[in-house]
Image: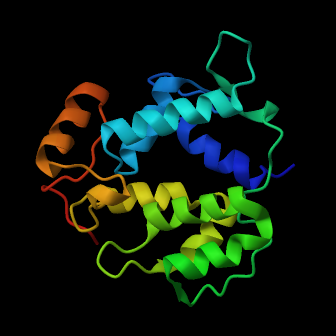
Amino acid sequence: MSTPPFHRLLAFYSNRSDNPDTQTIRLGDSLRGNLALGLDFPFALAIAVGRHIWLRNTGIFSLSIHVPSVTTTKTLLDGIPIDEKKDYTRSEIVHAAKQNGTVGQLDAFGVWALASDVETGLLKGSDVVSFQRGTLLQEIERRRKTRNQVLPVWRGGPISVAGHSWAVNAVFGVQVYRTDLRDD
């Protein structure tokens, strides 16, 4: 049986702990995953807490997420016809997601904010297709290892890139926006 796309996206977070468990996401795993995507700490924490409140399924007092028990299997951009070779503006991708309702449009905005080029603001169609398949987050993490694609502050990026890079590595063990790596 194949892993559903939404569960593949969640698996990005479930492998973040010192003892990776592909079936369970803890709040710390979620936070480390968001930091690896280049988000500044307050944004990363808010999104992690929101994800755990929305998807928690292991008990009333637990914020853990048991991935196989999450009933959502498709991404909110599922079913949107995307040309992999085209680049999309924010308004184009949000408009394309209109068929999936307001929550689908919010998801489209989130994908655009995380994955679009920081200089042009254009989102690659191939990135949208990757998101629909559940494989985009690993690619975004790779982009955020160096300083070639630092998220702007207004899209959730850090105020001080050097300070952020040092702090999240020292406190959470997440390496992001490094100067000693080359983007190949």
Q: Residue at x 49, y 82 (%)?
A: 89
What x and y, as percent, mark residue 169? 23, 35
Quarter of the image for the C terminus: give it: bottom left
Q: Quadrant of residue 18?
A: top left
Q: Residue at x 34, y 51 (%)?
A: 38
Q: Residue at x 64, y 33 (%)?
A: 22
Q: Quadrant of residue 134?
A: bottom right
In this rendering, would 106 be left or right of 173?
right
Q: Nearer the viewer, residue 91 or 29?
A: 91
In this rendering, would 126 be left or right of 73?
left
Q: Residue at x 43, y 72 (%)?
A: 116
In this rendering, would 143 be left or right of 131?
left
Q: Is residue 130 above or below residue 177?
A: below
What x and y, as percent, mark residue 19? 50, 22
Residue, far top: 61
Coloring scheme of the render? rainbow
What x and y, as percent, mark residue 91? 54, 79
Residue, far front: 102
Q: How many marks?
A: 0
Q: Is residue 80 above or below residue 140?
A: below
In this rendering, would 150 be left or right of 56?
left
Q: Nearer the viewer, residue 38 or 54?
A: 54
What x and y, as percent, mark residue 131? 62, 63
